[in-house]
Structure formats: structure tokens, C-alpha cells
Amino acid sequence: MERLAIGIDIGGQSSKCGVVTQGGTILEQSVVTSLIDNFDDYLKLLADTVKELIRKTASQGFVTGIGIGAPNANYLDGTIRYAPNLTWARDANGKPGVIHLADRLKEATGLHVSITNDANAAALGERTYGVAQGINDFIMITLGTGVGSGIITNGGLLYGHDGFAGELGHVCAVKDGRQCNCGLKGCLETYASAMGVARTAREFLQNSSQESLLRKLDPEKISSKDIYDAAVQGDEMAKEIFAFTGRILGRALADFVKFSSPKAIVLFGGLTKSREFFHDEMVQAMNDNLMQIWKNRIQILYSSLKESDAAILGASSMVW
Amino acid sequence: MERLAIGIDIGGQSSKCGVVTQGGTILEQSVVTSLIDNFDDYLKLLADTVKELIRKTASQGFVTGIGIGAPNANYLDGTIRYAPNLTWARDANGKPGVIHLADRLKEATGLHVSITNDANAAALGERTYGVAQGINDFIMITLGTGVGSGIITNGGLLYGHDGFAGELGHVCAVKDGRQCNCGLKGCLETYASAMGVARTAREFLQNSSQESLLRKLDPEKISSKDIYDAAVQGDEMAKEIFAFTGRILGRALADFVKFSSPKAIVLFGGLTKSREFFHDEMVQAMNDNLMQIWKNRIQILYSSLKESDAAILGASSMVW
């Protein structure tokens, strides 16, 4: 019988569960809502879904454990801590609390449960099934609504003393720059995410009188997709928005290299679909800010995993 | 018989060799010149010194290996690579070259030899004998002529894919800031080192007409010691120079925390003698730039090792 793992990707809206082979094939998957307002009900839904998936794949192998990728998840103690976007992860006063998800799901299913934050899960997935196979030192940067990161050093995830290592979306990219949700200013995430690119567009529109297709849109509703579409049509402002993003990201990547000297940086997430418009500027800025020993030597890789599968695969890879 | 280790601290001017017990006592030490212009002669001197030290301590224990801390040393392949300040580490054309120091000293002495860069050796020394005993995740920052770093994660040194991880003296502290010897601009080292503090003094003197004891000195010869002495006498400009340094260093430390989430940051080196004048501003700037999960939770420690012994102890700790 083949060994199987369950991967669960928990998001604010929905939770995706899948049964995965060691080769990285998803045999069965199921999507359930995350919009439940108490933990006991959510836990029951999750446990029932897991049991159903096990039943469906029983003829193909046996499930040896569960891996979960979730926002604000801490590998070291198996908790989810103060996750603002998970409705079921509140305390008695309705505020984001500390939820012992790993222990409780283990009780409910009898399986070993590991959890980690979503960017760490993505890094593990890339190493187990994706472009980073065989690479012992790399940094995964997820360019989605925000910016997340998972750092692999010496073949394993870097957790730090408290499990929270790798908050690279919140390094200071621009001194006294844009206000970030985390309370700080100038965080990389406020520039190099889908949200950040949209902010850049609003700034550019406001601070110049340059013509642009983007002027036809409601500035408050501009999305990174709109900017991409304009860039594809040759819009100069849209192209400059991505180039500006690439320069800020590349400078930040150079400083990351000085920390852990990775062989590669792996980029993942919605914003990478626009890479044709920021890749060159990003690489140039990174190399311009690296010392001779690293200049032109750090690989930039883009995730090869299907975005819809990557999170389940990443979470499941914790089991192996 | 007690197990002993030899620690060698190689600097541009001299090389210090010592025999160290597992408890961190230096039984014997010897200082030889580094100012030799070919590697074979330097190697012979080093091997002879090692043999003499072994002879002297033979009644107290047996030496099990040699650890070396040296500039531009690479742990992974045992080489010293392109060290501009080591006269014996040149290639046939007189330019800094690649020297297989670990292998050659092993041949010459019969002992196992490990080498690493000086800041990494300092970090190991602090963990084995100093303030970081029992701390599995910390960052060592050496504030000397330049700024070096050694990063301990999960109990071991972070080396990266090529052995060069931890070049935190060269992260960008000030965008388009001061020219650094490494070729980049705004490196932390150009602000938060003895050299950097002296540059700050020259800038302050030039850009203001504020009275200061420092005006009595030749600006080109001002040292961090002069600035410290002025600060002790209550000189406002001297105090502001250190405060400025603390703010830049603190901001940089905050970004380091976001990378590896260390339990502590350990500071070492000549500049820490002036800490009464920069500590508060550094801590304030660090916490101002940290997210809630880390604010006021990262310990700042100062090395407890005697500076003259620390390098030998650190190098020797690689043997254990």
C-alpha cells in the first residue's frame, strides 16, 4: 500500500483539503467553507472532511498524517495565533485568539498533525514537488495580496526561536514609506504585492498627468490585473508601475541574500503572472545591490506548481 | 587526560594561537606575525607554533583539533578567498587569491582543521563560552573597524549555499548612502562601525557650526575613541553622533529579526565600549520597527568575553 498524506490549505474564505501521494499527485480533494464563527464547529467540519477523504482513498493507500498551511500558524507549538482573517479563530471576547489547532485535530482524527504558515508550506511544497527540488538553501517569496516568505536553510525551514522567522514582507523597503496593516511604515508588502501595485498605480495617477489607460478606471478599484492588462496593451504608465515594483523588490532581495546566501530565490503567487513586466528590473536591482561574490550568481526561479494545487501540496509535504 | 583544542585568530597584522580547555580556559598562547609575503613560509610558522603549543601543554591534555577564525574564510571548502588584508594570501600575480588553508595546515600538523570567518567564530565562542550559552537562535554583530555578523539558527551557524551567509555589515542601511569598500552604497558598516562613526563625525562637523570639542581635532584623524572621550565630557555633538549611529543600527537590527527571529542579538567589538551613548536609541529604533509579536521581546546582549581572548576562544569552539 502506498503512503499518503493529507494537505490542508486554510484561507479566510475556504479550506482546501486533499489527499496527496509521495509523488505529488492529488488523489482526491474537497473544499469547505472557513466562514464559521466558532472553533468547535469548524473543527468538526474539518475532521469530517478528513475522514471522508480517507474513506474515498482507502483502496489506494493509507494516510500517515496531516499537514496544514494557515495564516499566523506556528509550527513549534501547533497553534494559530491572532489571525485577524479567520472567523473561527476568535477568543471568548470575539477577538483573534490562540487556537491549538494541531492538538485538537489530532484528537479528532487520530492522525499526527503539523501546521505551519502558508508561505512556509509553499516553500516546502516547492522543495518536495516543484522547482526547488534538490536545493538546500533558498528563499520562497509569495507575491499575493500581501508578501509572505519561507526560508529554507541547510535543507530545512528556518523557524527562529519562536516559530515566526521569515516575515520578509515586513522588512523596511522604503524608509518612512507607505503605512502597512502591521503598524509599520514602508514594508515590502506595501509595494511588492497585488495590493502594493494598486497603491503604486493610485500614486502615479495622482502625481503625474501622464496619459494612461488606467485613467479610465475608478482609482479606488484598480487591481493588479487591470495594470497588467494595460501593460500588455503597451501602456507606458502601467509598465513603469511594474518596473518600479521590480526595482523595490530587487533591492530587498539583495539584502535577503546577504543574510542567508541562498542558491535561489523562488517567486510564487498572483503577481508573478505579470513577471514579464518586472523581472528584468528586479534582477538588475538585485545584482546592482550585491557584492561581487554573489553578483549574477543567485538564481531567480518561478514556481512550477499549479497555483490551485500548490497550497495543498505544500501543506501535505510536511508529513514526509 | 583532558581534551584540548587549538584556536587561531588570524588578522592582517598578527595571528594569535591558543590552547583552550573545554571549559574555556586558555592554557597557553602565542602571537606570531601575519606579515609574511608567501604562503609556504606563513604555513610553516603556523605549524611550528601549533607544535610548540602542543608540546607545552602535553602534560595537561591532548589536542583534538584546530579551529581558525580568519577574514574571508569559507567553512564549506576550508579556503580563504580573496582576502585583501592578508599579505600571504596572494596568488602568483600578487593579487588576493584562493588559499586552501585548512587542508594545508592539516597536512602540516596531522590535526583536523576547521576554518570560518571571524564573526562566525565570535558567534560560536559566545555560544560555547559567553553570554549566548544555551541560546539556539541569535545573531552576533561585531562592531569593530567594520561590521561583521555570525548567525546562529537552530543551534548551528548559518552558512548558506556557499558558506558566505551573514554579511549583515553590507545590507543597505541608507539608500544611496555612503560609499562602502565593497562597492555598494549605504552599507550598515559605513555607519555602525568605528570607521562609520568617524565618518559621521566628519559629516556633522562639516554640515553644522555647532560648537564641539571635536573641532579641536584634525577631522581626517578623528577616531571613535576621540568621539567617545568627547561624549564622556558631555559634548553634545559627540553624543548626537552616537545617538544617530544607534538609530541606524537599531533599524537594521529590526529587519534582521524579521528574517531569523532570534531570541537575542549579541553585540561585540570596540564600538560596544561606547554603548552607554547609543544603546537606548538603538533599542528604541529596533522596537519602533518591529511588529507586535516581537516588540520589546528581543534581548540585546553584550559579549562577556575578554576581547583579547574572544577570538581564540571562538575559533577553538569549532573543534568541539
Image (cartoon, coloured by chain):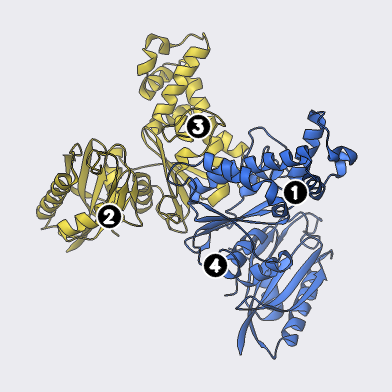
Chain colours: A yellow, B blue
Residue B316 quadrant: bottom right
Which residue is at 86% across, 41% downward?
Answer: B220
User: Alpha-carbon distance for marks 3 and 2?
Assistant: 43 Å
Question: Percent position (x, y) of residue B114?
Answer: 62, 70
Q: Please give left or right for residue A298 compared with residue A225 in the image.
A: right
Q: Are marks 2 and 4 on the same chain?
A: no
Q: Give the chain letter at badge 3.
A: A
Residue A23 badge? 2
Residue B221 seen in this snapshot: yes
Q: Give the chain letter at badge 2.
A: A
Question: Percent position (x, y) of residue B106?
Answer: 67, 76
Which residue is at 47% across, 61% downward?
Answer: B154
Q: Amino acid at mark 4?
A: Gln
Residue B194 badge? 1
- Give the camera-side residue of B236 and B136: B236
Residue A185 badge? 3
Residue B133 badge? 4
User: Alpha-carbon distance for marks 4 and 1?
Assistant: 27 Å
